Image (spheres, grey):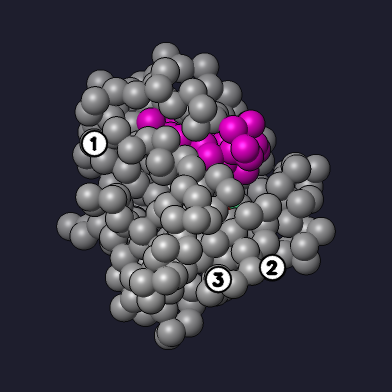
Amino acid sequence: MPEVEVCFSPNVYPLFHKDDAIVVVIDVLRATSAITTAFYNGVAQMIPVATVEEALEYKKKGFIVAAERNGEVVPGFDLGNSPFGYMSKKVAGKTIAITTTNGTQAIKAAEKAKRILIGSFLNLDVMIDYLRAEKKDVLLLCAGWKNKFNLEDTLYAGAIADALISKYEFTTSCDSAIAAGQLYHLAKHDLYEFLSRSSHRNRLSKLNLDRDIKYCLTPNQCPVIPVMEKGSLTKLQLA
Ligand code: 3SL
C-alpha cells in the first residue's frame, strides 16, 4: 500500500525524501494559493526563485515578476502573493517569475523530488483524486513560517492525509500525518475561526488581508494542479 507522510518544515525535508514519492508543496497563506489561482486564470508558466536578487534578474529580462517578503510586495515588483493579483487578464498566457518568504523556499527544498505538485485548499478535491489514482507514496511538505511549524499548512496536509487513508488504500506510520489528520477534523467546520489565534492569520490581518485569508481557506475554487517541470511550474494535464 502507498504511504503518506507529512513534513512540517522544509528544513527537515531530507529526512523524508524518497526517490519515487510525489511531493505536494503547501503554503496555504498565501503562496501556493496564489500559484493555484494563477494557473486557474490562465497563467502559462511560473518560475519559482529563492531570492529577490534572482527575481530582479528576471525583471531586467522583461518578465512579469512577483516578489513578496513578510507578507508585503517587495517595492519595485509587479505582484506579491495576493491571489487576487492573479485573476487579471493581464497575466493570462504569461510567464511569471516568483519569490516568496516561504513557499518558493519549500519548492527549492524539494527540488530532488521526482514530482512536485502545488497544493492549496483551492484545489483540495482535485488533488485527492489525482493522488489516489497515482497510487504512489505521497509526502505533504508544509512550507511553515521561516522553517517553523504553522497551522494552516498542517490543516491542508491533514485534509489530504485523512482522505487518502480513510477513503482509499493508503497507509501511514508517520505520527505527523496522524496529528495533521486529527487537527483537520477539529478545524474542518470553520477553518477561519480555527485559525483565529494562528501567527500568520494574525500577521496578514494586521496588513488588512482578511479577504485573502478567507479566499485561501475556501476549498475547491480552482480545480487545477500546478506541477514542476524542468525548473518551472505549469498546469498538470488531468485525464
Ligand atoms: O511565505 C510565503 O511564501 C507567503 O505565502 C507569505 S505571505 O502570505 O505572502 O505573507
- First in sequence, mark 3 or 1: give its number: 3
Q: Which residue is mark 1?
A: 114
Pointer 3 residue: 77
Nearer to the camera, 204 or 232: 232
Viewport quadrant of the C terminus:
bottom left
Tag of residue 211: 2
Q: Position of residue 224 (x, y in %)?
A: 35, 61
Cα separation between marks 3 and 2: 22 Å
Question: Which portion, as a residue range, is magenta?
Answer: 139-163
- The answer to whether residue 217 of the structure is visible from this angle is no
Quarter of the rendering containing residue 17: top left
Image location of residue 37, percent across then percent down: 46, 66
Q: Amino acid at mark 3?
A: Phe
- Quarter holding residue 8: top right
Residue 228, compared with residue 210, is above or below; it is above
Tag 2: amino acid: Arg
Q: Element under label 3?
A: loop
Classify residue 210 by image quadrant: bottom right
**Residue situated furthest bottom in the rendering:** 89
Q: Residue at x 48, y 77 (%)?
A: 87
